[in-house]
Amino acid sequence: MIVARMDQNMFSLFLKFTHHVVSISIVGIFLFIPLFANASVGEPSTIGYQGRLKNSSGIAIEGTYDFIFTFYDEASGGTLLATETANDVSVSDGYFSVTLNLEGDIGDFANLVYVQIQVKADASSTYETMTSRVVIQTVPYALFTRAIENATTAPTSDLFEGRVYYNTTSDVFSYYNGSSWTAVANTSSTSLDAAYNNFAATASKLTIDAAQGQTGGLEFESQVVDNIIIDLQSTGDFVVQDAGSTFATFSDSGTITFDGATSTTSTLAVTGVATFSDDIGVNGGDFTSSATTFNLLNTNVATVNFAGAATTLNIVDAASTRTIDIGGVTLNGTTTVNVATNATSADTITIGNSHTSTVVAITGGDDWSISSAGIATFAGNANANGGLDIDDAFVVADGGVLTTSQTANFDGVVDFDGQVDIGDNGDTVSIDSSDWDVSAVGAMTGIASITTDDNQTTLAVNLPVTGTDATIHEISFQIDSVKAIAIAGSGDGAGGVNGPNRSTISIGQNGTNDNIYIGSATADVNITDASWSVNSVGTITTTDDIAINGGDLTTTSTTFNLVNATATTVNLAGAATTLNLRDAAGVATIDIGGVTLNGTTTVNVATHATAADSITIGNTHTSTTVAITGGDDWSISTAGVVAAGLDNTPTTNGLCHSGADIDAGTDTAREVVPCSAAPDDYAEWYETDSDVSFGDLVALS
């Protein structure tokens, strides 16, 4: 309930009239200001009149002037109602002001009144009359307003219908109905209920307008130490409207609703603290703040919930370019931020968008931990510019990329379902572990090189077998190029010291009966080095040729068997023009044939060619001994002649034999003959029983 009280000074009337005076020498612009006296004394008796004088050139004039104001009931002619004279009026910059005394019915302005104005200089004897009269419109509401007057008893004189007065003793407004005074409230109550009852069954509106040119708003000012109470005891609501459209409703059920029937936005502006002991419902609109700092949660509140039944909760700023802080922004205490922790079903937390890159920066003191009972999944890139320490299983799903420019420490299992890229062709990737396993169902590609630490003794590639063993376990090295594939042992040995046997490549040394295949039907296997050794405890077997181009086939063992007993034929030389069988020092014994075997051995030398062969034994430097040892007989079988090229002038025996005599089988056969047609003098070398003729050679005596 709002109770309003009006005193005698609340009503005044300010009327302005503008008049353009056209004359030969003076132009006047006048402003009528009726000045009403205090309402308690009845009708006003004076009216203020202000104006401005200008000459015919439009220039404001100065000086002292006399005025005559004549009032008529018509614009021209008519009945003279009153005449007022104002002499010695001071005019400054054209402005002047006079007060006119009005008597009789002219003062109530119930009808149109026309004013004729005359003016002359103080020293002049002739008045100039304005060419047209100024009209003063009827102002009945001003009449009734001036009729509201204060009195302790009802007035008894100058009565007219519609006159209203305020009784200062009973605090009741009364109006004169033409025959008697009637109280507006019909009681002595100080409320407006009686006035509202006078509207009869259909309630009317109390309208406050600016019909008189008011520029201020309607204000209720309480200067008492008490409340202004709006008590809705009916079933109706307290509604605030703008041009008939409701934007605020205070219902009798206690609900405050802000809505915009003709606008998309309604604003509740609070400069102080707004306290709510129950829920605040924002249905369809926004909850905004224009302050630079907005705290939604007070320190006294233990829990604040967002969303509720909402399907989507957006926390954004208006410009989408600011910083949104969640947690202890300005507090130094221990802060816990829980996101999607109370639901029993699987939650999805999405950070970023699919348009431009989103940066999630995590900054803290010594450690910043993310604890998850499930799996952290990233549909896009996960970039860790600082240290990434994961104590449990870590999974990057198909299509995801984990990128870090700093150190990533994994104490648990790291499971990558997609492609794993380590380094950017310019970084060093270090793996430090006593047992580091890389498991791959498919192929591991794009590895340029693998380098171990200094003085590393072992780099093992282990292919474990669980269950039934496969037929073949294969380690493949493929280079899609016409260039060679190299498996090299390099380095200068421990401490950088050069020395032999410093590079060792071991293949198939831990198993039993290993088979090692090198090359294919169309591939060449080349071994090039100044000293390249193949060490084998067992047998090296090949089903095809072994080509040694430019090097030697050597052994450091006391016995070296080139062919196994199961081979029926071994061929040496092939397309070679010279075949040398020798030892490294040139002083040992070279055995050909059944060296340690007791079977019948046949040694064939130069037997497969169709051209004449030359077999040379010995050299031209020192004497060479060819020792033929055997059982009873050691035969040299030849389809041709055995020719011995002897020196013509030997210093020792040119050809000798030991043992039994050499006896030709027939007279035509010769035991020993010269290789040329000219005979040698054999008689000089042998003692004979008789003369020796050409063609005869007898045994020694």
Image: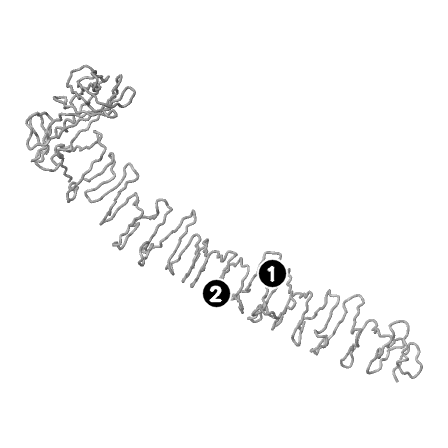
Q: Secondary structure at mark 1?
A: loop
Between 108 and 311, the residue placed more toward the observer is 108
Q: Position of residue 377 (x, y in %)?
A: 41, 55
Vertical side of 115 occupied by 420: above or below: below
The residue identified by callout 2 is 432
Q: Position of residue 631 (x, y in %)?
A: 76, 81
Q: Position of residue 329 (x, y in %)?
A: 33, 54
Circle nearer the viewer, 1 or 2:
2
Between 365 and 356, the residue placed more toward the observer is 365
The residue identified by callout 1 is 485
Task: Specify few, some or many for label 2: CA neighbours under 10 Å numbering under 14, 14-19, or 20 or more.
Answer: few
Task: Specify few, some or many for label 1: CA neighbours under 10 Å numbering under 14, 14-19, or 20 or more.
Answer: few
Q: Quadrant of the N terminus?
A: top left
Between 399 and 79, the residue placed more toward the observer is 79
User: Does the CB distance between marks 1 and 2 fall below 8 Å?
Assistant: no
- Compute the Cα span from label 1 to label 2: 29 Å
